[in-house]
């Protein structure tokens, strides 16, 4: 039975990482604001994901937990000091469960993960292997008894970020701009710079498109190599913040990407996505929304294995040809956005 929510004035949502997961967790933000219009709603995350939530219009602020400089005891003390009435743990690891338990909150929401349920008095059944990650987050609100009135994810940026993007994204008017994102957390999720370079050349030639190569921390060398393999020019942005990246992605006609954080940012700002998938399952972690398309090597039976290292030579990516991915690009670029 859902708890009595009267008197809830201060709310904390916990999702520490990763960037894409934090983007998908923003689906709870407007629903909480609608249910608790006068409450102070805060978010707890790690430094790499702070930019995902700091411009969210439905939050009052965010706390940053940097485990390099802050002990678990200091984190608990910081959270207790805020006197939250409601804590929603969307991360559910042992540390966030303990923080939730010791927060002092009257209502503590979490998932039925082994060894964690002691921390919560409202428990949601985990369905991470059955529903999209966005719905997994909403399950916590439904267990709480909060009505789901909004099913959007959110990623905000400022006018300065928009100006930055406008200055960088100066391509001829009337021509599409396609962003290529060769990065990804695991090597098994990466299609390969050689493939992306060949694809980008074909897109530039067929659609007279401008090409932008996205990159994040530790990925610039890969972006430079991709550009060097192309016969047509491509633009590589300087180091950007996540809001600057979001502003640039919003100005793109299409993002072609591996499963990655920038993919979820693009979905949040409304940019169509062609997602290249292999070891992860797009039904669970795919780009959120109806604008997008997924390409996989459907000849394989091992798709969605979630292996960080492939024991059979990475066939899901190696066996996926440029022509197959280009067909997905054509399907998205030749179809008016409104009809999608």
Image (cartoon, rainbow, N blue to C red):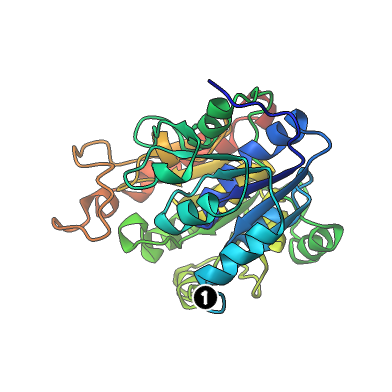
In the picture shown, does residue 235 fall above or below 112? below
Residue 133 placement (x, y as % from top left): 47, 38
Q: Image check: 146 left or right of 316? A: right
Identify the residue shown where x is 68% and y is 40%. 29
In the picture shown, does residue 126 fall above or below 241? above
Residue 214 placement (x, y as % from top left): 57, 63
Q: Split into 4 quadrants, where in the image is the C terminus?
A: top right
Residue 153 placement (x, y as % from top left): 64, 39
Dot 1 falls on a residue whose secondary structure is helix
In the picture shown, does residue 10 fall above or below 55? above
**Among all residues in the image, which is located at the extreme left?**
312
Identify the residue shown where x is 71% and y is 51%. 42
Residue 66 placement (x, y as % from top left): 56, 71
Q: Which residue is mark 1?
A: 220
Pick the residue in front: 189 or 91: 91
Q: Image check: 286 left or right of 114? A: right
Identify the residue shown where x is 56% and y is 26%. 142
- Does residue 313 appear in the picture of this structure? yes
How many numbered circles are shown? 1
């Amino acid at each position: 039975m859902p708890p009595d929510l009267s008197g809830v004035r201060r709310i904390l949502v916990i999702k520490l990482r990763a960037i894409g997961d934090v983007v998908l967790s923003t689906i709870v933000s407007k629903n909480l604001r609608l249910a608790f219009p006068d409450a102070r709603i805060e978010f707890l995350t790690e430094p790499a994901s702070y930019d995902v939530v700091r411009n969210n219009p439905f939050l009052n602020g965010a706390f940053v937990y940097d485990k390099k400089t802050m002990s678990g005891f200091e984190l608990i003390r910081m959270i207790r000091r805020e006197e939250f009435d409601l804590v929603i743990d969307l991360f559910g690891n042992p540390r966030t469960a303990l923080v939730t338990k010791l927060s002092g909150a009257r209502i503590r929401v979490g998932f039925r993960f082994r060894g964690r349920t002691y921390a919560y008095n409202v428990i949601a059944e985990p369905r991470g292997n059955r529903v999209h990650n966005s719905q997994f987050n909403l399950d916590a609100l439904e267990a709480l008894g909060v009505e789901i009135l909004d099913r959007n994810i959110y990623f905000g940026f400022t006018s300065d970020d928009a100006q930055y993007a406008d200055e960088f994204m100066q391509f001829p008017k009337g021509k599409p701009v396609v962003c290529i994102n060769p990065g990804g957390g695991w090597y098994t999720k990466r299609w390969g710079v050689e493939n992306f370079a060949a694809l980008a050349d074909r897109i530039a030639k067929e659609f007279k498109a401008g090409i932008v190569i996205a990159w994040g921390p530790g990925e610039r060398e890969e972006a430079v190599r991709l550009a060097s393999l192309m016969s047509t020019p491509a633009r590589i942005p300087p180091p950007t913040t996540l809001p600057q990246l979001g502003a640039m992605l919003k100005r793109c006609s299409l993002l072609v990407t591996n499963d990655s954080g920038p993919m979820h940012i693009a979905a949040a700002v409304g940019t169509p996505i062609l997602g290249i998938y292999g070891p992860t399952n797009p039904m669970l972690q795919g780009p959120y929304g109806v604008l997008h398309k997924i390409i996989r090597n459907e000849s394989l039976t091992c798709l969605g294995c979630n292996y960080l290292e492939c024991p059979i030579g990475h066939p899901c990516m190696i066996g996926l040809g440029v022509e197959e991915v280009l067909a997905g690009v054509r399907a998205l670029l030749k179809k008016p956005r409104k009809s999608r």
